[in-house]
């Protein structure tokens, strides 16, 4: 059974549901509050899970070199990478930002070959190309708006989106180094979330935003969506992503984890009754054909 590939696919599904939950809560209480709060609840879920699976609440006995790689992974992915991506959302919109993020499998395949001597067979390369093309076809639909009048602003948005993609690649590569020797993915997830938690809440404290964050939790509808999103995303999604990186080649794992724009099409139809266009359907079928080749 290809456990790494299966974990990567489940990661994409988890992150797709996360987008729905966090979009709802973010509209009500703000994206900054959601970004900080998701880590708190995910950390609590992780502590309980670590106690059940590993016998302790926190992996205190982790080797210093693993701590170093996981701290770097958290900083590059959960802090800087996400910050660049969220900024790109504002400057160039979500579709073009997601298109730039669809380059992650390409860079991951390259770094997997250079750093970890991973080889990709022809049928797997065909699967990666199909999946990435399907995602790109989906996220560029409706991208016919004229370019922003401020070309400098537009170029900065492209730069931030590209940096967000590189942050995700660096996050996967550095996490891979920490996971050698079958180190428990749940322990690595606890450490990564704890590092991001300290950094983001430290910044919130300096900006005097902690009280406003707690006050926002009084919105019950937003709070329930926030809890659900924290469970399927920073808790379950990141845990599964590390299992994927540990057990599958970087290029294949990152390709499968790049599928949320495609998976969101049927989810948005079910939850928001949004019409599925012919282009969206074609892109979905193309990406699913790529996934089938990767599993085959």
Image (cartoon, rainbow, N blue to C red):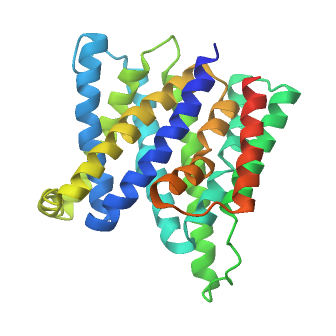
x and y percentages locating residue 85 in the rendered image: 50, 58
205 in relation to 144, above or below = above
**Extreme-right residue of the structure:** 122
Instruction: Note whether 137 is above or below 144 in the view shown.
Output: above
Along the viewing direction, whichever of 152 and 230 lies nearer the viewer: 230
From the viewer's perspective, is 19 left or right of 3? left
The location of residue 23, given as percent across then percent down, is 40, 59
Residue 245 position within the rendered picture, expressed as x and y whole percent measured from the top left? 57, 27
Residue at point 24% right, 26% down? 47
Can residue 59 be seen here? The reply is: no
Q: Where does the image place residue 174, in percent across and percent down from the top left?
A: 53, 32
Q: Nearest the camera: 280 or 68?
A: 280
Question: Foreground: 291 or 109?
Answer: 291
Q: Nearer the viewer, residue 203 or 101?
A: 101
Residue 37, compared with residue 62, is above or below; it is below
Left or right position of 37 against 85: left
The residue sitting at the bottom extreme is 149
Q: Quadrant of residue 215?
A: bottom left
Residue lying at 77% horizontally and 38% vertically, measured from the top left: 289
Q: Residue at x 69, y 31 (%)?
A: 252
The reply to whether residue 181 is in sight is yes
- Point out the image quarter for the C terminus: top right
Q: Is residue 225 left or right of residue 244?
A: left
């Amino acid at each position: 059974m290809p456990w790494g590939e299966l974990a990567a696919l489940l990661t994409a599904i988890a992150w797709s549901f996360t987008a729905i939950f966090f979009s709802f809560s973010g509209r009500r209480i703000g994206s900054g509050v959601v970004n900080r709060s998701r880590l708190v609840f995910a950390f609590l879920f992780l502590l309980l899970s670590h106690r059940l699976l590993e016998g302790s609440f926190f992996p205190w006995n982790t080797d210093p070199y693993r701590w170093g790689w996981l701290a770097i992974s958290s900083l590059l992915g959960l802090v800087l990478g996400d910050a660049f991506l969220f900024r790109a959302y504002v400057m160039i919109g979500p579709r073009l930002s997601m298109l730039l993020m669809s380059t992650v499998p390409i860079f991951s395949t390259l770094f997997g070959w250079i750093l970890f001597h991973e080889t990709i067979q022809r049928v797997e390369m065909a699967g990666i190309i199909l999946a990435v093309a399907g995602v790109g076809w989906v996220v560029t639909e409706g991208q016919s708006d004229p370019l922003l009048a401020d070309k400098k602003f537009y170029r900065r948005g492209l730069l931030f989106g590209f940096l967000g993609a590189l942050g995700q690649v660096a996050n996967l590569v550095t996490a891979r180094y920490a996971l050698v020797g079958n180190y428990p993915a749940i322990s690595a997830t606890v450490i990564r979330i704890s590092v991001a938690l300290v950094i983001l809440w430290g910044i919130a404290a300096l900006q005097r935003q902690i009280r406003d964050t707690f006050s926002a939790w009084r919105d019950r509808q937003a709070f329930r969506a926030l809890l659900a999103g924290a469970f399927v995303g920073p808790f379950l999604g990141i845990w599964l992503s590390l299992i994927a990186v540990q057990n599958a080649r970087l290029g294949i794992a990152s390709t499968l984890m790049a599928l949320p724009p495609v998976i969101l099409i049927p989810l948005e139809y079910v939850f928001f009754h949004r019409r599925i266009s012919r282009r969206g359907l074609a892109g979905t079928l193309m990406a699913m054909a790529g996934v089938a080749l990767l599993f085959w």
